[in-house]
Amino acid sequence: MVRINKVATKTGDKGSTKLAGGSTVLKCNQRVNAYGTVDELGAIFGLLRCEELPEKLRLAICQIQNELFDVGSDVATPILDNETRPRFPAAPVDRLEEELEQANEQQEALTSFILSGGTRAAALMHMARTVTRRAERELVAVQQTNVINENCLKYLNRLSDWCFVQARQLNNAGKDDILWEPGK
């Protein structure tokens, strides 16, 4: 486990930070942007946990927050040649796929795009979905110049879909979704 004795180290006062492994980069580095957005996403899920939610969903969100911390840690750690360090595994991706299938079976097919909203919890879940997509885009940008763990990218991709179907679940299995009306 981690032990943190001092939070304000002042080492970032000139705009740099250390990645896991010890290399120093600017705080505007694409890798820092990516894991910072993953951290932001975890905070949005924390907000969601403050809402009135079914216990099963609350537990799923808690698990996702832990997994996002693992993803952020993985993204913050450059992959080195001949590395033996464990990385974010594929199992959470598979679990999200199973949960997506189950939730999809409970919802009516979409006849239009939907707007974020309905219940407050659904709106927050849509916010989580859009921040997940941003984290995914930022990780793709990291991938342009660095080797990444592709399980992290797959996880973010599935998580955005999971957020979408969960938002619909929070809107009475899609019955209270707000449909897009083009030109209105």
Image (tube, grey):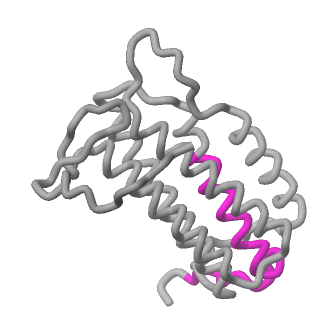
* Residue 174 in picture, x, y percent from top left: 78, 76
Give the farthest residue toward the top: 82
Q: In the image, is 112 to the left or to the right of 77?
A: right
Which quadrant of the figure has residue 25? top left
Which quadrant: the N terminus?
top right
**Magenta part of the chain:** 156-181
Name the foreground residue: 67 vs 129.
67
State the residue at coordinates (48%, 46%): 72
Give the farthest residue toward the front: 5
Q: In the image, is 99 to the left or to the right of 32?
A: right
State the residue at coordinates (14%, 58%): 13
Name the foreground residue: 140 vs 22.
22
- Residue 136 painted magenta: no
- Residue 136 vertical position relative to residue 80 in the rendered view, above or below: below
Which quadrant of the figure has residue 112? bottom right
* Residue 130 in picture, x, y percent from top left: 50, 65
- Residue 161 vertical position relative to residue 70 in the rendered view, above or below: below
State the residue at coordinates (74%, 48%): 96
Q: In the image, is 132 to the left or to the right of 172?
A: left
Give the farthest residue toward the bottom: 184
Q: In the image, is 56 to the left or to the right of 164?
A: right
